[in-house]
Every structure is written in structure tokens, then in C-alpha cells.
Amino acid sequence: MSNVSTANLSSLRSLDDALITVFGGGGFVGNYVVQSLLSRGARVRIASRNPSSGFALKPLANLGQLQFAHCDITREDSLRAALHEATHVVNLVGAFDGDLTQLMGEAPGRMAAIAQENGAAAFVHMSAIGPDAESSAEYARAKALGEANVRAAFPGATILRPSIVFGKDDGFLNMFAGMIEMMPALPVFGPDAKLQLVYVDDVADAVTAALADPTLHGGKTFELGGPEELTMMQINERIAAAQGRNRRFIAIPDGLSGLFASLPGTPMSKDQWTLLKPGSTVSDDALTFADLGITPRPLGLFLDKWMTRYRKFGRFGLSNERTKRRAQGA
């Protein structure tokens, strides 16, 4: 269900029959963005190096409402084909491996330049909290370059910087949930790092709101964070509690965390550690969800339900006492 305020509903109707190219539309966030756009009556073209990743969305579209295009975003001719006759453009491409400078720095600028040349009404670029041209992390440098290139090529673009995005099928909560399910004791890297986890449907609504009213939201940058700040330790503890499991969490010092991240074959890269250490929260002076007319939803609204499949015996594993507390809203 949409979480966009009533004030924005009239502007969202303006997407009826728009042709919106969504780069990276088959990914985790893209899946929700495309659903939001389809529900507004837009025609959506998913442009991806692997178009089949979005095929699960086919049943949600009306006849002629959804199109798939193979696209290599590093090639201008491929971008031009994907942007042919597009009235609106969304770039959701993000990665932690490969040529990040090319994928997240240079390619977005080329997308924006072609969209501007074609007379597109709106361009939404998905960045992330903490872009930094001077960072030791290639990811943060690439994000900063991408923002600069998009803004130079399409001055009226809307840039969205979400914190870590969560959802039922994400790779963040489910990674920790799987480890907590299996291991009696777990290390926690960056235990005091603060995150404003942001719900994927709220991010999708932000994209839709920005596209629908470029006069109001164009040329601006928004930082998107959830309604609460949680440390990495608190997130792990909440996941364990939602599973009904007692787990021991071991806070790992920063020095050991950095060493671990620098080793080959570990689940956390050096870039990811560099980005995690300072946390991911919205700046005090940033434009936020509120400026888009959206009220973000907290993790606690969903976590108990999503963790059911990780509990011992699933729904049948809850104790009578816990069932009683849940029924009482405790």
C-alpha cells in the first residue's frame, strides 16, 4: 500500500501513459519502483543487462504497459536505444564490484545527457547517503561523481540518497537473519554504527513522487532515512528477538573489523567496512521524506512477521506466553 500523503495523490495521476525507462529495474529496489509506477498507470521500460531479472513483474502490468530492453549502460548507443521516446527516466544502478567509476560515475552522466537532449520531463537518480569525492572507498567516490555528472547534464534532475534499504526480500536483514538462525554466537562489526534503515516501499514512493512533480522536486537532493536510528548491535538484537532466539553477540573492535574486511573471500569488502564505520543517517539540514509528502515506516512494523520463517518450527514455535504478549500489544 502506498504511503504517499493525500496532498501528493493528484500529482501522481500525471504519470498516466508516461513512458518511463528504469535502469536497474530488475533489482531489489527496482522491483518495488516498477510496481509503484505501474500502479500509477505509467508505461515502464526496464533497461538492464539481464532483462529476465524483471520478468516476475509481468503479471502486475496491463497489456502493453511493461517492456524489457537489454542495455549495456557503458555504451552510448545502448543507452540511446533504451531511452528512445522516454518521457521520464530513473537510474537505480548500483554495485560493489566491477568498474564502479564507470557504472555509477560516468554512465549516469551519459544517461542524463541523452535524457536532456530528448526533452525528458524528469530524471531521478538514485545515489546513497555519504557520497564523497575524497573517500578512500571507491563506492563513495563513484557515487559523488555520478551525482555531479547527472546534475551537470540534467540540472532539473532529482537526486535521492537513501540509507540502507530494507524489505522482505532484501540482502541485508535476511543475511543477518540466516546467520542468527544458525549460529549461537555472532560477531558484530561496527556495533555502534548508527543506521536509519529505510523501507523499500517508501523509497519507491519517493521515486514516484519526484517523477510526478519535477517542477516541485526537480533540481533538489533528498536524503531518505527511516524514522529511527539503530546501531548495528541493536539491529542484530532485534532480529534475534523477532526469531525468538537467545544469541550472544560479540562486538568486534574497529581494528579487527578493518583487517577482516581486507581479507579475500570475506562477506564484507573493504569499501563496505569504510562505509559502515561512520554509519548512515540523514544530515540535519537535508531535504527528507517529509519534503516529498511521505511518512517513512519503521522496521518494527514488519520485522516480527518477516522473521517467522526463521523461527524454530515457524508459526508453531512461539511460546504461549509470547503469543499472549503479542496479542496484548506488548
Image (cartoon, rainbow, N blue to C red):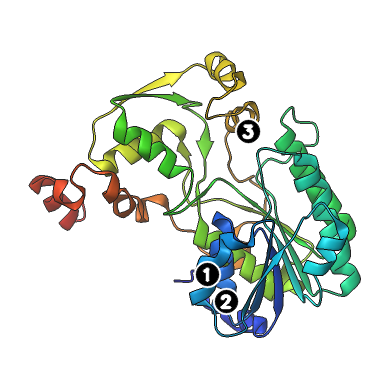
Quadrant containing the N terminus in the rendered view? bottom left
Q: Is residue 155 visible?
A: no
Rounded to the nearest whole Å, what is the CA distance between mark 2 and mark 1?
10 Å
Distance (Cα) linking label 2 and label 3? 33 Å
Three-letter code for the amino acid on which mark 1 is drawn: Leu
List x then y, in percent, for residue 60: 50, 76
From the image, tell me which residue sits under label 2: 38
Estimate the x, y position of residue 256 in percent, counting from the top left.
53, 14
| Secondary structure category for the residue under label 2 | helix
> Local crowd at mark 2 within 10 Å, few (<14), some, or many (≥20)?
many
Q: Are marks 2 and 3 in contact (CB under 8 Å)?
A: no
Q: Which mark is residue 275?
A: 3
Residue at the spot 50% in from the left edge and 66% down from the top edge? 56
In this rendered view, identify the residue nearer to me: 18 or 52: 52
| Proximity of marks 3 and 1: CB atoms separated by less than 8 Å | no
- Where residue 202 sits in the image (x, y, percent)? 52, 61
The residue sitting at 21% across, 49% down in the picture is: 314
Q: Secondary structure at mark 3?
A: helix
In the rendered structure, are the residues bearing label 2 and label 1 in contact, judged by CB atoms less than 8 Å apart? yes
In this view, the residue in front, 27 or 192, is 27
At label 3, counting other C-alpha atoms closer than 10 Å, the crowd grade (few under 14, some 14-19, many 20 or more) is: many
Q: Residue at x 11, y 45 (%)?
A: 319
Q: Which mark is residue 57?
A: 1
Q: Which one is closest to the eye, mark 2 or mark 3?
A: 2
Give left or right: position of 97 versus 215: left
